[in-house]
Image (cartoon, rainbow, N blue to C red):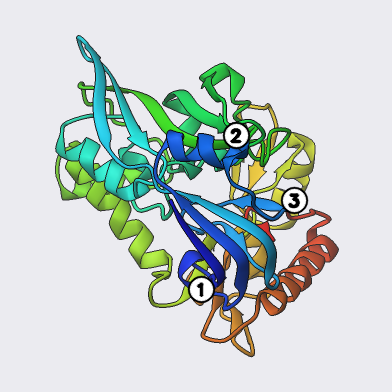
Amino acid sequence: MRILKNTSLKPYNTFRIDCSARTLIRVKSIKECGLLFGGGLKFSKPLLIIGGGSNLLFSGDFNGTILKPEFTGIAVEELDGNDVIVSAGAGVNWDGFVEWCVNGGISGVENLSGIPGSTGAAPVQNIGAYGVEAGDVIEKVVAVNTTDGSKRVFRNEECGFAYRASIFKGPEKGNYLIARVFFRLSMKNKPNLDYGSLREEVMRTGKPTLKNIRETILRFRQSKLPDPSVIGNAGSFFKNPLVSKMQAEKLSIKYPGLPVYNDLSGRSKIAAGWLIEHCGWKGKRVGDAGVHEKQALVLVNYGYASGKEIFELSEEIRLSVLKEFRIGLEREVELI
């Protein structure tokens, strides 16, 4: 366990917002969590648990305690025919985990290649891309209660997975620290290519192997999304809104070319990036806060923007989309 006082948070958030935390604690084991939450150590509140900081926007200094789990290790826990259970520590880099699976011929997470952040954050946000969500393949989550340090196992059905949401982001937010995530995957390649032009691009460059699918998706992401190590950003800033099928049909008539997708909920999903771009925001810059020139869904920090400045820009975008389309955009990024 490492305890840092009055430390800069710039290395701990991909927006690279320069603010500080009163206390930052890095924990490496469930035993350390038990010591911390069981009363062995005192820490100032409020408490914020972070992963790779790839889905956070700090509006200013954090006057409490930030907890960063750094549990490591990836392991095959069970193997039954083609079915395989793989676990990873919460501190494992997510894309590193995906790469490990692909290199080992393990299928199920290759569509989630290139997503920044840690494995422990995957169930919190229910990360998703190219037709796959983490909740589709998570078997269970091992977590530590932040009140008394006790350990609890959450089965998939207990996690409340929904579009970019879970109980860890909702009713249980801050109540549990995720220590390890278990995934039900497969030793048999089961390509999921029914998203946009993914199938066409994969087949154009070769067979639908795990490696080819991963490399194709990485190319997609690199061509559309800025590298957080070069330009501060947190990926998609807004969720794709869900509307009724009737509203989607009316919008499609009024706005030809509007990307609309069927959702499992029975509603229609609208591409938020298209809405934002149509309102003229793509590539716009206000000081050091801006909208990415290639992907309107991504807000960026060109250098010295504050979290407050990026938030204010996001509110202007929301208002313009609401005025034009009568659709309220919801942030995917968490404002702290």
Q: Is residue 148 above or below residue 225?
A: above
Is there a contact, CB below 8 Å, between mark 2 and mark 1?
A: no
300 to the left or right of 191: right
Coordinates of residue 204 in the picture (x, y in percent): 20, 48
Q: How far is the residue under mark 2 from the one under mark 1?
A: 30 Å
Q: Residue lying furthest front in this view?
A: 40
Number of numbered callouts drawn: 3
Coordinates of residue 305 in the picture (x, y in percent): 61, 83
Q: How far is the residue under mark 3 from the one under mark 1?
A: 41 Å
Q: Amino acid at mark 3?
A: Leu
Q: Amino acid at mark 2?
A: Gly
Callout 2: few (<14), some (14-19), or many (20+) C-alpha neighbours within 10 Å? some
Q: Which one is in front in this view, the residue at disc 2 or the one at disc 1?
A: 2
Residue 10 is labelled as: 1
- Determine the secondary structure under disc 1: helix
Q: How far is the residue under mark 3 from the one under mark 2?
A: 54 Å
Q: Amino acid at mark 1?
A: Lys
Residue corresponding to mark 2: 38
Q: Residue at x 73, y 33 (%)?
A: 171
